[in-house]
């Protein structure tokens, strides 16, 4: 088999990334600002000037604005190599090589999507200490009791309702973030709970506002609603890293954001291929992707989590 052109593979992954994780299209893409292939620096403006009514004291005192930076690193995601033996390539009726490559891509994309969502609610401060979405930006669900659905959870949780989403809208309004380009990504069961909480009129309007080509299933409370099998998980108000087992009291969370408030960047995308390897009697394939993301603001404005609350 001839080697895969890197640019072809990169374009293929980017196209698949958008299809597998459509929510990633609704963020600031900062790939062009990756420094040294590993880090992105986002400038944050300092305090705005004060306003004095009917100023009577002159000269006015000039104050220097102190700007700061939010920084995030790109992580390296690699797949475990897979080998396809010579006799498989010649005897199997389907193209196993293509199937293996597709499997590597889809696995990478799922991992990148999970990690970007986690990075949008966590980060590193300018002083190098850990940062996390503040409790003031976390809304707890208020619906009727439903059984916990995720492996590791026990007991009941309060369902996700339209009122919870409306609270997120009000909180985002108080943050003075733009009312356009707002998105809410809901875990599949929470999405069903939201739908169940709608009135007939709300449901009709919701269905008419769908933009399925871009992954938007409808619009409610000023948010473009999207659905995904997994979104976020929390222990109390602390986000749980992807791949970490949930505990009995862990809670599932949805994420609401305004497009200008979150960012992501893709670094190098590279396929690895070793044809006719004498130790494996066939071809070996693997892949690597650099990716990262962050809330773009140090004050966390424009990013809100709606997290399950415990129920009796």
Image: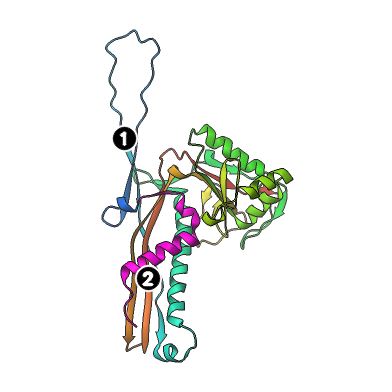
Residue 22 lies in the magenta-colored region: yes
Front position among marks 2 and 1: 2
* Colouring convention used in this rendered image of the protein: rainbow
Q: Residue at x 40, y 44 (%)?
A: 296
Q: Is residue 276 above or below residue 210?
A: below
Q: Residue at x 37, y 64 (%)?
A: 11
x and y percent of residue 269 in the render?
A: 34, 65
Q: Which disc is residue 231 wearing?
A: none
Q: Quadrant of residue 276?
A: bottom left
Q: Which residue is mark 2?
A: 287
Other residues around mark 2 within 10 Å, as few (<14) / some (14–19) / many (≥20): some
- Magenta stretch, overall SS: helix
Q: Residue at x 33, y 77 (%)?
A: 273
Q: Is residue 61 above or below residue 21?
A: above
* Kind of element beneath mark 1: loop
Q: Which residue is mark 1?
A: 67
x and y percent of residue 243 in the render?
A: 50, 62
Residue 226 lies in the magenta-colored region: no
For the residues labelled 2 and 1, the Cα–Cα distance comes to 39 Å
Q: Which residues are magenta?
A: 1-30
Identify the mark nearer the N-term, 2 or 1: 1
């Amino acid at each position: 088999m001839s080697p895969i052109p890197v640019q072809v593979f990169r374009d293929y992954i980017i196209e698949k990334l958008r299809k597998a994780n459509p929510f990633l299209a609704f963020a600031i893409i900062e790939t062009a600002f990756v420094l040294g292939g590993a880090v992105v620096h986002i400038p944050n403006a300092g305090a705005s000037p004060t306003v004095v009514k009917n100023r009577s004291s002159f000269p006015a005192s000039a104050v220097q604005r102190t700007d700061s930076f939010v920084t995030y690193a790109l992580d390296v995601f690699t797949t475990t190599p897979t080998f396809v033996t010579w006799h498989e390539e010649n005897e199997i009726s389907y193209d196993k090589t293509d199937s293996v490559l597709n499997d590597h891509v889809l696995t990478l994309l799922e991992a990148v999507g999970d990690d970007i969502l986690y990075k949008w609610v966590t980060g590193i401060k300018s002083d190098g200490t850990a940062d996390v979405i503040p409790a003031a930006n976390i809304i707890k669900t208020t619906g009727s009791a439903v059984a916990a659905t995720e492996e590791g959870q026990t007991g009941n949780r309060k369902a996700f309702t339209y009122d919870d989403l409306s609270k997120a809208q009000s909180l985002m309004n108080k943050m003075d973030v733009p009312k356009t380009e707002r998105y809410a990504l809901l875990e599949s069961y929470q999405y069903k709970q939201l739908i169940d909480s709608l009135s007939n009129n709300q449901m009709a309007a919701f269905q008419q506002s769908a933009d399925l080509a871009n992954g938007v299933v409808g619009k409610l409370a000023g948010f473009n609603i999207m659905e995904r099998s997994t979104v976020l998980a929390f222990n109390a108000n602390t986000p749980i890293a992807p791949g970490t087992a949930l505990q009995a009291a862990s809670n599932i969370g949805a994420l609401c954001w305004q497009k200008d408030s979150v960012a992501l960047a893709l670094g190098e995308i590279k396929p690895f291929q070793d044809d006719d390897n004498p130790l494996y009697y066939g071809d070996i394939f693997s892949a690597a992707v650099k990716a990262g993301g962050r809330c773009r603001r140090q004050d966390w404005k424009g990013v809100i989590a709606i997290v399950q609350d415990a129920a009796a």
